[in-house]
Amino acid sequence: MDSAEFHAAVYHVVRQIPPLKVTSYGHIAALIGMPKHSRHVGQALKFLSPDTTPPVPWYRVVSSSGAISSRGPGTEGAQRQKDELEAEGVEVSTGRTGDMRVNLAVWGWFPQVGSIDLPEFAGDAAEGDEELDQ
């Protein structure tokens, strides 16, 4: 799977996350047959254009612990994600240190691998965990 196919597969799966649910970068990677590429899932979502059609609910993807990524110093990405989730009705807690987290036991969406719709090319990667062609 090349980078464009990987990004397309990520967007395709993320569009299937129901409202009021969240999942992890790692689970998206597993669903598309690339379980060792959770960081690449984050990168794919980072490069989304605001005018992507149909829209991709990027804010429904968090870390495996339920934490919302800070996205680096001086950025507002974590706050934007929190705001989007709360606008949808998902509860986001904020810890003493400002860390933001979603309770995956309550809000998690973790369908079994092979149980959701994938783009046709993504099935090729499901056999193994090949590297992404850049």
Image (cartoon, rainbow, N blue to C red):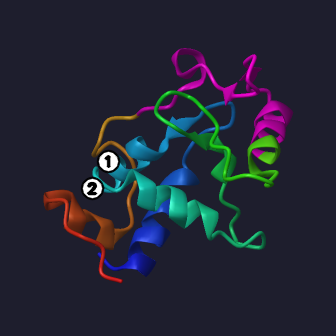
Q: Is residue 32 above or below residue 98?
A: below
In the rendered view, does 17 fall on the left or right side of 80? left
Label 1 crowd bin: few (<14), some (14–19), many (20+), radius 10 Å? some
Secondary structure beneath dot 1 equals: helix
Name which residue lies at 29% across and 75% down.
1
Q: Which residue is painted at 37% across and 52% down in the image?
A: 29
Q: Is residue 72 left or right of residue 120?
A: right
**Depth order, front residue of 112/41:** 41
Position in image of residue 49 (x %, y %) = 71, 73
Nearer the observer, 47 or 112: 47
Question: In the image, what residue type sits under mark 1?
Answer: Ala
User: Which amino acid, mark 2?
Assistant: Gly
Stretch in magenta: 81-110
Q: Is residue 99 among the parts visible in the rendering?
A: yes
Does the stretch in magenta take in 95? yes
At numbered mark 2, what does the secondary structure look like: helix, strand or loop?
loop
Taking 93 as reference, is 72 above or below it? below
Residue bearing mark 2: 33
The answer to whether marks 2 and 1 mark residues whose Cβ atoms lie closer than 8 Å is yes
Q: Quadrant of the C terminus?
A: bottom left
> Which residue is the site of mark 1?
30
